[in-house]
Image: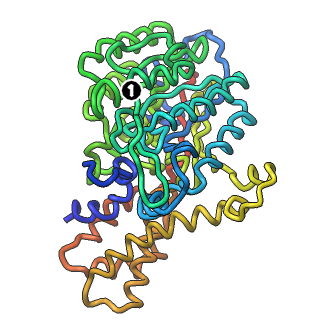
Amino acid sequence: MKSRIFAWLLALILLSACALALPGESGRVPLGGEPEKGKGPAAGKEMKEYRIITATDLHYISPVLTDQGEYFTNLVTYADGKAMPCIEEIAEAFIDRVISEAPDLLILSGDLTFNGAVRSHTDMAAKLARIEKAEIPVLVIPGNHDIGRKSAAMFRGNTYTRVPSPDAELFRRIYRDFGPDEAESRDPLSGSYTWRAGEDLLILMLDTNSGAENALPEASFPWLEEVLSGAGRKGDRVIAVSHQNLYIHNKAYFRGVVIDNASRAAALYEKYGVLLNLSGHMHMQHLEEDCGVPDMATSSLTVYPHHYGLITVDEEGLTYGTRDLDVSAWAREKGSEDPRLLDFENWSRTFFEETMERQARARADQLEGFSEAEKKTMTEAMVRITSAYFRGEPLDFDAVGEGMDLWNRVPGTGYGAYVESIRRDLEKDHRHLEVRTRRD
Ligand SMILES: [Fe+2]
């Protein structure tokens, strides 16, 4: 039953992982607790402070590849709520935001592009070059939408034509200045690499999309253990990054979401005291912290409320908190007269909620024995639950109780089971994390 529910509602999420196919294409350390092996700074070593920005699942498309016409508009209107009509402005606002925040590092954890077109990648690389020109290093890894995509296309009017998508080697060449060419160590079998942020901080970029599908190549594990053990010997703190998730964030929904051989990587991360894994892919803001190394999945930068993560690392440990990209402020600064941009928070929230509403309403309309008013209540409840789930915010279940009771009356669908499966998630705030490492 549960799987049927997720086949529907969490298809919204799955869409973000596999949607937009064209026709014809198929140990958090407890606060105040004892630090674990390798997690604390080496005794007597002075720790530098770091500020890192992370974002994921931008799904950028070059303006050359879309006229925002009928075909493209239909595609994104009935998809997963990404604010694609304003993708160029979101990308530009983010680049400008990063430059003005001036962090020590920007990490992008995959799905850089909408459908993996070479042109979208080269345009994205040009934007990232603006950040590096401001002397902010940028690190990228590919997501499942970035390499070898048959759905890479150019959209004109009510049709599309296919365009090239890079192989793993071309991807690395396009983004060579954003990690690969500056790596301290590179895995020869995937695009994985390590990058030294400073004397005491190492970033591990794990590529689970170019050497194998949704996995780190099995033969890459000796490399992974070597870099982690080396970091342990030096007393480095390590932050790991992947596109797909390190742990199961929802037991009813994980195939193709969690890295296939994640448990092997997670065991090494725990063994060598990796501080945190940063992931994405689900487009949901979600923290899984009960499995060992916390896995913080940042929601898509292109989906309301346009989260990016701000991480600080200092001698006390590490903090992560989301920030909402303020596109309206950027638009005003640029002198834009586009009403969508000037009231972007409202426009984007409506765009997302209407996408969810269309899908919830379509499901409610298939049901018999419910009045129009009841279907409306059911639809509204599902939109509120799904919206909170994506944003990683707690939900007041009392506010949606009537709608959920109605869903529970639908025979044999298990909507109640669905709500129960995410109830625990919706009770907590997934937008913040603190990891203490100080050895007192
Ligand atoms: Fe993805």
Towards the viewer: 377 or 62: 62
Pinpoint residue 18: horizontal percent, then vertical percent.
34, 48
Q: Residue at x 26, y 61 (%)?
A: 7
Residue 307 position (above or below residue 173): below
Tell me where residue 170 sits by quadrant: top left
Q: Amino acid at mark 1?
A: Asp
- Side of 229 relative to 336 (left or right): left
Pinpoint residue 23: horizontal percent, then vertical percent.
30, 54
Pinpoint residue 169: horizontal percent, then vertical percent.
40, 20
Quadrant in which the C terminus is drawn = top right
- Side of 294 relative to 195 (left or right): left
Ligand 1 visible in quadrant:
top left
Towards the viewer: 335 or 290: 335
Q: Residue at x 75, y 36 (%)?
A: 100
- Count the marks: 1
What residue is shown with label 1?
A: 207
Instruction: Identify the element where label 1 is drawn.
Output: loop
Pinpoint residue 220: horizontal percent, then vertical percent.
30, 17
